[in-house]
């Protein structure tokens, strides 16, 4: 049995959730402290498979700045954030780039691309 | 002297939305003046996501949000000048500006929209004692260095102030390999949005020290350590609670100030609490034909609300140019009652309201379970139940014009009715 305390961010209320994981043959999650069903979903997701959009920059040549902002086109597992940063930091591109251009395809086999978030 | 119908000062999110909306409302002769080398304003350095949920119904990064408006501005053929600094706006709407290619510019506008944004409070504004080494930055300056210029500003970081930029920078510095030792907040609650506390601090196990402040900075050429201390309910340091943090960088996220030098010189009346111009329902300042919107008017937490407000300013500037705005008449006032820090707009001319009157406000403390009571003079117009109110989150109320038009009153007030927690 493990417990985790999580602040819900489904809305600005910020409920203090306690998510309890019970293993009685099957996985069972009990969420307390939530004031709405969205809090329950959020609590379970955070406990089982937390994901995030990662934003950063990559080096760019032939542009008016030396960094171009990028993001994951979708959420990646939270545990892969620092590995993904390493991949992003290896890249160096050259302008012109359009917003939405793919900078890294299928990063770390997640099925998620890293895309440029501005034209430069 | 060159003539324009509408001149917008500032090419950030407020200026872009205002210019586009003025054009949408039938004014063609528009100029946007921007002092930076590109349009988009501070959004260009806000590379994190979370922008546009209300306006576009999707989560964009700052540069993506900006680019949508910049593209629209290009497509509409709205004129703009970059690297151009406005020096003076006169009450009769003459604008003196300069740049390196055209020299001094003398521009006459029928309407002016002030959209200069805000700037950060610095160490000097909060008087932190200690030496004056390198390594002390405002969070936004550090953000620009890291995200646009490609310079890492430090390795061991303490952040003072838990405003959103400070929280965002705590995560950003961590991702780029720095160790963020703590975010220190003077108040007993954070000045930032909950989602930023969770996703920027909790995700990376960065401690948030509420009711703490920094009382000393040490370091010869570079920051070497800061002294953090707990404060009492009057925000005075408690002796004996000092903790030394070994760090090379201090980031400050201690508030934003609307940048109103131009407005003040023009003679625009400034509100003591918002730090921005006093405006009416049409976002018009105390000088007829000079409008204001975005962070120069009052500091927002979401750019989506800046866009919405700026569209109103742009539209009304167009109405003013076309002589569709009733300039005088019966002026009502708004009044921030118990628990409400300020309300924008401060003045209302009911005849000019199209469909709805929009009131934006901030509360002065954290309230769980309260009612916002809207009154027309002493009569309660409406009670709105709120589960959660915080100074970090701007509240807005819309009142249909039909509810105001045929009623006699002088003041619209909003106050809180607080139930016991």
Image (spheres, rainbow, N blue to C red):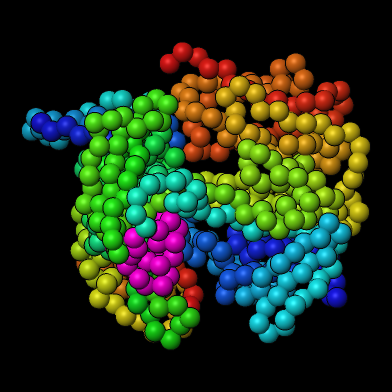
What residue lies at 71% left-to-right and 28% top-to-bottom? B335
Residue B164 relative to residue B217: left or right: right
The location of residue A5, given as percent across then percent down, is: 24, 33
What residue lies at 17% left-to-right and 32% top-to-bottom? A3
Residue A56 relative to residue A21: left or right: right
Extreme top residue here? Answer: B420
What residue lies at 44% left-to-right and 36% top-to-bottom? A12
Q: Which of the 4 image quarters holds residue A47? A: top left
**Quadrant in which the N terminus of chain B appears:** bottom right
In front here: A110 or A119? A119
On screen, A83 above or below B281? below
On screen, B198 above or below B373? below
Residue B395 part of the magenta-drawn span: no
The magenta-colored residue range is B133-154
On screen, B291 above or below B234? below
Q: Which of the 4 image quarters holds residue A32? A: top left
């Amino acid at each position: 049995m493990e417990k985790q305390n999580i602040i819900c961010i489904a809305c600005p209320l910020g409920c203090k959730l306690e998510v309890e994981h019970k293993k009685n043959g099957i996985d069972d999650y009990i969420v307390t402290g939530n004031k709405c069903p969205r809090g329950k979903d959020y609590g379970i997701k955070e406990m089982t498979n937390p994901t995030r959009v990662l934003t950063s920059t990559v080096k760019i040549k032939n542009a008016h700045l030396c960094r171009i902002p990028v993001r994951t086109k979708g959420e990646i597992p939270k545990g892969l954030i620092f590995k993904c940063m390493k991949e992003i930091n290896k890249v160096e591109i050259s302008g012109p780039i359009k917003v939405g251009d793919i900078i890294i395809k299928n990063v770390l086999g997640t099925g998620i691309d890293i895309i440029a978030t501005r034209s430069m | 002297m060159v003539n324009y119908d509408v001149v917008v000062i500032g090419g950030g999110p407020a200026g872009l939305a205002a210019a586009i909306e003025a054009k949408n409302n039938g004014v063609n002769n528009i100029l946007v003046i921007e002092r930076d080398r590109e349009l988009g304003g501070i959004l260009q350095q806000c590379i994190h996501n979370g922008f546009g949920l209300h306006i576009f119904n999707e989560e964009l990064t700052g540069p993506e949000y900006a680019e949508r408006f910049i593209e629209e501005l290009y497509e509409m053929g709205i004129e703009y000048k970059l690297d151009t600094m406005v020096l003076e706006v006169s009450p009769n709407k003459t604008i003196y500006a300069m740049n390196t290619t055209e020299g001094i510019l003398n521009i006459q506008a029928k309407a002016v929209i002030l959209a200069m944004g805000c700037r950060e409070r610095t160490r000097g504004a909060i008087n932190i004692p200690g030496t004056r080494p390198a390594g002390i930055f405002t969070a936004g300056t550090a953000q620009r260095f890291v995200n646009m210029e490609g310079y890492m500003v430090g390795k061991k970081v303490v952040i003072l102030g838990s405003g959103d930029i400070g929280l965002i920078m705590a995560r950003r510095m961590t991702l780029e390999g720095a160790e963020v030792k703590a975010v220190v907040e003077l108040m007993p609650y954070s000045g930032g949005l909950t989602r930023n506390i969770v996703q920027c601090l909790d995700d990376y196990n960065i401690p948030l020290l509420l009711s703490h402040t920094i009382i000393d900075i040490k370091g010869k050429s570079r920051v070497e350590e800061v002294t953090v201390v707990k404060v009492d309910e009057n925000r005075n340091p408690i002796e004996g609670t000092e903790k030394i943090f070994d760090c090379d960088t201090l980031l400050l996220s201690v508030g934003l100030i609307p940048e109103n030098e131009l407005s003040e010189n023009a003679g625009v009346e400034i509100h003591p609490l918002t730090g921005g111009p006093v405006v009416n329902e049409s976002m018009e300042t105390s000088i007829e034909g000079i409008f204001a919107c975005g962070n120069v008017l009052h500091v927002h937490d979401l750019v989506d609300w800046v866009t919405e407000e700026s569209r109103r300013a742009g539209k009304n500037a167009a109405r003013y140019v076309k002589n569709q705005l009733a300039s005088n008449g019966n002026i009502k006032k708004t009044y921030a009652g118990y628990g409400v820090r300020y309300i924008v707009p401060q003045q209302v001319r009911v005849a000019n309201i199209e469909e709805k009157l929009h009131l934006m406000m901030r509360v002065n403390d954290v309230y769980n379970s309260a009612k916002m009571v809207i009154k027309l003079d002493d009569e309660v117009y409406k009670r709105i139940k709120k589960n959660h109110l915080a100074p970090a989150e701007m509240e807005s109320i819309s009142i249909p014009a039909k509810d105001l038009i045929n009623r006699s009153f002088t003041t619209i007030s909003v106050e809180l009715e607080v139930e016991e927690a």
